[in-house]
Image: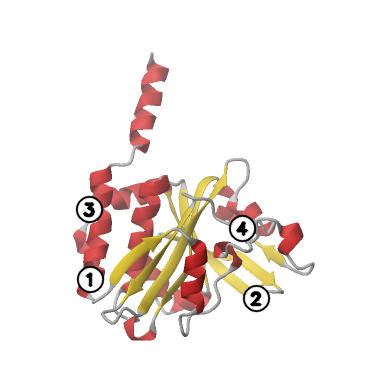
Amino acid sequence: MQLILKRQHATMKRLVNPLRVSRFIRMYDDDAAKKGIKLSIGSDFQKYLSITRATPTKGPTYPNFRPDRSPIESGDGFWMVGLDENNKVAALQAVRLYNLPCSNFANHLQSLKAFYADPTMHAHPDDSCTCLAPSAKKMTGKVAYHGDAWVRGDYRGKGMPKIMAGMAFGVSFAMWAPDFVCGLVARWLLDKGVVAQYGYLHREPGGSILRLVNEDIVDDDWLIWLTGEELRGRVDRCDRGELA
């Protein structure tokens, strides 16, 4: 009986409270609206790619979020776009779920499966990824990957990274209640304080030492992350003071 009760208690802890999640998401959506930004969400990554390619100053979208290299099944990913008062794109980001019950995020990166659905078909022979961040090896189960973040120049320094990350956290939690939510970021984003706005509690160097020849990508990114319980705690608190 005690074992059954423990299992029931664990199940209850994992349940998502829809009212708290809706309040959490609404908090960030309202703050975006105050800045003249209308946020919307989508799941068609072909459409997302067409938006990113048509957006000036936005760099190329990595193959993680490109349907021609790494298709995302329905329910396993979403993207967000923020439009200004003239209906022009001012902010973008994408999130996808990696289901890793028998692997971990470090192995997923190093196998190149994080970037290509079939590395044997799409990867160049000289492509490589090394993950030295120790915590990446502990990231198993449902790992929500947050990436492709971009904010237009005239909206930088106005709190948009915090808003976009908050929306990513809320929607990820509502859809998946993941075991981890993480990202890979360049050191200069840490040095400039941009990553601090995202609200991730942990960071480690050596998250992804990456070379993708055909994509003309060479990176040495840090790993940033929250655990599932830390994400749940943020949503449950729904502290409006965070946006002050």
Q: In the image, residue 208 lies at what x, y percent? A: 61, 65
Q: Residue at x 46, y 58 (%)?
A: 225
Q: Nearer the viewer, mark 2 or mark 1?
A: 1
Q: Nearer the viewer, mark 4 or mark 1?
A: 1
Q: Give residue 33's mark.
A: 1
Q: Eyeballing the image, is 187 above or below 80? A: below
Would you call the spot at circle 4 few (<14 residues within 10 Å), some (14-19), or many (20 or more)? many
Q: Eyeballing the image, is 186 above or below 65? A: below
Residue 204 relative to residue 114: left or right = left
How far apart are labels 4 and 1 at the CA level? Answer: 34 Å
The tag earlier along the polypeptide, 4 or 1, is 1
The tag earlier along the polypeptide, 4 or 3, is 3
Q: Which residue is mark 4?
A: 114
Q: In the image, residue 148 lies at what x, y percent? A: 49, 69
| Three-letter amino acid code of the residue under disc 2 | Val
Residue 122 relative to residue 33: left or right = right
How far apart are labels 4 and 2 at the CA level? Answer: 16 Å
Q: Give residue 218's mark.
A: 2
How far apart are labels 2 and 3 at the CA level? Answer: 39 Å
Q: Nearer the viewer, mark 4 or mark 2?
A: 4
Would you call the spot at circle 3 few (<14 residues within 10 Å), some (14-19), or many (20 or more)? some
| Three-letter amino acid code of the residue under disc 4 | Ala
How far apart are labels 3 and 1 at the CA level? Answer: 15 Å
Marks 4,1: beta carbons within 8 A:
no
| Three-letter amino acid code of the residue under disc 3 | Arg
Q: Which residue is mark 3?
A: 23
Q: In the image, residue 56 lies at what x, y percent? A: 46, 85
The tag earlier along the polypeptide, 4 or 2, is 4
Q: Give residue 173's mark.
A: none
Local secondary structure at mark 4: loop
Q: Residue at x 68, y 71 (%)?
A: 212
